[in-house]
Image (cartoon, helix red, strand yellow):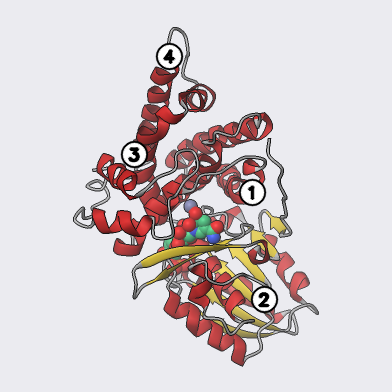
Amino acid sequence: MKNFSFYTPTMIKFGKRSISKLSRIIDGKYNRILLHYGGGSIKKNGVYQDVIEQLHMTGAKVFELGGVAPNPKLSLVREGIELAKKENIDLVLAVGGGSAIDSAKAIALGALTDIDIWDFYMGKAKVERALPVGVVLTLPATGSETSMGSVITNEEEQLKHSVDDDLLRPAFAIMDPEYSMTLPDTQTFAGIMDILSHIFERYFTNTPDVNLTDELSEGTMRNVIKNAYILKKDPKNYNARAEIMLSGTLAHNGLLGLGRDDDWASHRIAHQLSALYGTTHGDSLAIIFPAWMKYVYRTNPERFSRFATKVFGVSDAGKSNEMLALEGINRFEEFLTKIGLPRTFPEGNIPTDNLELMSEKAVLMGPIGAFKVLEKEDVLKIYNLAL
Ligand code: NZQ
Ligand code: ZN
């Protein structure tokens, strides 16, 4: 196990009607709030009204900026930064999924600096301070409600990049699984893929002697898969929604990656699909992960064979690690099909004429990954395995 530091300061209020805790968290602490949200789902399902009711119970003045698009855009971030500076905002409150949260984090970061916000996403500037961010979560997926990351799309340059810093971890997160009941199936299951992918990015490692986090990861993956099947049949099942929501947070708050090298190549490779074609994040991961697995498993077949036996319960009798590895990947693909996710570019209706360019962009800031370090040619081969 490697040395590590671990910091998860986010206060979580989890469960039915946890929104009722919002006014007490805010009152007397935050006075000028920027309420930031997406394209309108919260106005249809009542979450917006719940939040406004709570905010009206406080002495805070509320400013609003809606319209965050999935794969949130730099232009709206810039608008938000301007507003936050002008109105002297002291809390950015995101209501929604990863896009609203990530956009809120970007605004919180940009509000306290004169450095161009995109410089942080290009690794040219270091995070020194940021406004606090609060979250009311409506879509369990990205883990952004406690994570250190924010992912923004520069629509002019067709680049999707992230900045990661502990200072971007939200101050608090309200997590009511009932808020996720209005999700269309497509988003529920894309979210589930994203949750699994955050575990994969950490689980597939060459760092030895990390058994505790391996076991925690395997338990979380089994639990996510089990509850995904429950939600496929019964989307209103509260306990399954709760299990998925909690899993989403644990998958990406850093716990499952303690003491090991994590990878993140698949995210970089998948981001190119969203940057160019606006593909839903979870769908892009469903397309890329099986291809990445097939490309890299020979680097460490033991790791993949453990995945097969511990996560999918594949029997190891008389099988080599290589056979088990392939069986595990196969079982994972079957799972994707059963929950209705695309597994290839054609299944996702994604054009295939920009693979060169996408490979170039994936390694724009240097080789990617740790399980197997990937250059442009490797990325291109992975795209080709997903056709
Ligand atoms: O915009 P509205 O109208 O609110 O609709 C949204 C959106 O269309 C809808 N939705 C959300 N909650 C709903 C709902 N519809 C009905 N009922 C509800 N309760 O769902 C759609 C997708 O929302 P979005 O926030 O875009 O999805 P997600 O949470 O998957 O976030 C994706 C973004 O997060 C980034 C992704 O790259 C992508 O840009 N990620 C952020 C990470 C982080 N900050 O740590 C890590 C992840 O790996 C990921 O990269
Ligand atoms: Zn993700």
Q: Which mark is residue 291?
A: 3
Residue reaching furthest to the bottom: 86
> At label 4, which amino acid type do we have?
Ser
The local secondary structure at tag 3 comes to helix
Question: Between marks 4 and 3, how big is the CA–CA gap?
Answer: 21 Å
Question: Between marks 2 and 1, how big is the CA–CA gap?
Answer: 22 Å
Residue 189, percent from left and from top: 43, 47
Tag nearer the camera, 2 or 4: 4
Marks 3 and 1, the one that precedes in the sequence: 1
Q: In the shown orientation, is residue 309 left or right of residue 34?
A: left
Q: Are marks 2 and 4 in contact (CB under 8 Å)?
A: no
> At label 3, which amino acid type do we have?
Ala
Question: Where, by quadrant of the figure, is residue 216 drawn?
Answer: top right
Q: For this rendering, which residue is in front, 161 or 17? A: 161
> At label 1, which amino acid type do we have?
Gly
Residue 53, percent from left and from top: 65, 76
| Residue at the image position 47 percent from the left and 69 percent from the top | 44
Question: Between marks 2 and 3, how big is the CA–CA gap?
Answer: 39 Å
The local secondary structure at tag 2 comes to loop
> At label 2, which amino acid type do we have?
Leu
User: Label 1 crowding class (10 Å Cα cut-off): few <14, some 14-19, many 20+?
Assistant: many
Identify residue for label 2.
131
User: Label 3 crowding class (10 Å Cα cut-off): few <14, some 14-19, many 20+?
Assistant: many
Residue 355, percent from left and from top: 25, 53
Q: Which mark is residue 320?
A: 4
Identify residue for label 1.
254
